[in-house]
Image (tube, rainbow, N blue to C red):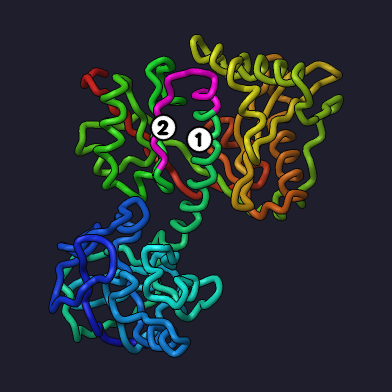
Amino acid sequence: MDGRVLQVNVSPGGVPKHSVDRAWIATDGLVGDAHRHRYVHGGPHRAVALLGIEAIERVQADGHPIEPGSVGENLTTMGIELSHLPVGTRLAIGSAVLELSGPANPCDVIKGSFRDGKSGRISILTHPSDSRMYARVIVEGEVCAGDEIVVSPPADDSNAAVFPLLDLLDDVDRTAWLAMWRAAASVGYDVRILDHGDLSAAACPELPGTVFNRAFGLRLVPIATDEVLDLYRAAGTSGWLIDGGAAGLAAGAVPAETVAVFAADVPAVAAAAPPTVDGLVIRDVDGFVDQQTWVELFIEAFEIEQPTADAWRRFERLLVRAHGYRQVIAELDGRPVAVAATQTHRRVAWLGGGGVLPEARGRGIQRALIHHRVMVAAMAGCTRTMATANPGSLSAANLEGAGLREVWRRRHLRFDPDGGA
């Protein structure tokens, strides 16, 4: 399926992108190219957009006014059915090497290229042969119109198959944290939130520490690093950049910790035999008294200090109402001894807030909580489950024992506006 570059396209932002003879492809995309929605396009994992002339001609045949470059692809190709290739496929073009990272979802910016604005005509969900594809840059280099494209299978050491899963898991994780931040803001805390889709961050000078001062999404959109750091400068509080990467280090952040991301298919975990703990009953939180019990157990199990403990007492009643959020209490011989929470989003169950009182630990309650929540997620139609834990910790061992597997390690960077430790 080797092919050629029909056209190289760039623009100062938006569409159409215009043909140029040649361009340099850097790690974050074509030099001289820009995007109207920088939080959606560009970045290391969506550096280059490609679309075949074959797909364009099929769309034209349906009566749509699409042209090369009009839907924002950087490289219009010929001779290759790009969206049929597996993620991780490598494309050697000129002196550059690209790696396909996934489909590009259509949006309203390109609706002018479609009859009645129906840009879904190039969605991979409805027309899998005609989708644009994103690629990351393995080797920087120059590309020219007419360059040969040499197609190779995914490399053995490629993480390409992991990144789409991470994109999904990051989105679900971020949704859970946003619900907590918004609940705290709703009861009067000064929680300053940035939310740009793939990028979400919060800063709260009243509640120092990582919980209310962290940023998700910089792995996908490192171009937003300065905006996130300005958030912490304005708030006068330290911030934690989740997978902050080279941009965060260059800006003065320092490594803080590494956290493992675990995931599994829900049916596989649900099919395992449940842990047996004599006298244990796990039930949903139901009513105001249960909510108070849940939050006090949570504070005690995680040894949450002031002022964050009082914040949890104030906003938990709102958090429990958030869409997709669910809390459970575990009772041992009738006495509440553990709590946990689940956030469901995009058919993924995020397992969070699992804590057991010290005197009840070592009996398998944490694994029982994991299995219970996965069973509930299965009944709700979830297909995947995820959680995070410190590598080598007891929590990590419990997740692995329940059937979840480590898929990634996030590097947390700490940024101090005053340069302090």
Q: Crowdedness of circle 2 by 10 Å Cα count: few (<14), some, many (20+)?
A: many
Q: Nearer the viewer, residue 72 or 408?
A: 72
**Picture coordinates of residue 94, whole percent (x, y):** 18, 78
In the rendering, which numbered label is found on residue 402? none
Residue stretch rendered in magenta on the structure: 183-195
Q: Say which of 165 and 75 sits in front.
A: 75
- Where is 228 relative to 234, above or below? below
x and y percent of residue 96 in the render?
A: 21, 71
Residue 239 picture location, percent across and down: 34, 27
| Magenta run includes residue 254 | no
Residue density around tag 1, few if under 14, some if 14–19, many if 20 or more, within 10 Å: some
Q: Nearer the viewer, residue 161 or 155?
A: 161
Residue closest to the far front: 116
- In the rendered view, tell whether residue 146 sits above or below residue 209: below
Which of the two residues, 23 or 186, is positioned nearer the viewer here? 186
Q: CA distance from mark 1 to mark 2?
A: 8 Å
Q: Which mark is residue 178?
A: 1
Q: Is residue 403 shown left or right of residue 161?
A: right
Q: Is residue 151 above or below residue 223?
A: below
Residue at 85 percent across and 18 percent down: it is: 334
* Amino acid type at mark 2: Ile
Location of residue 52 by image quarter: bottom left
Helix, strand or loop at mark 1: helix
Depicted 390 relative to depicted 127: above or below: above
Question: On residue 193, which mark appears?
Answer: 2
Q: Mark 2 falls on what kind of element? A: strand
Residue 194 is inside the magenta segment: yes
Pick the quarter of the image with the N terminus.
Answer: bottom left
Are dots 1 and 2 in contact, CB under 8 Å?
yes
Q: What's the residue at 23%, 77% (across, down)?
A: 93
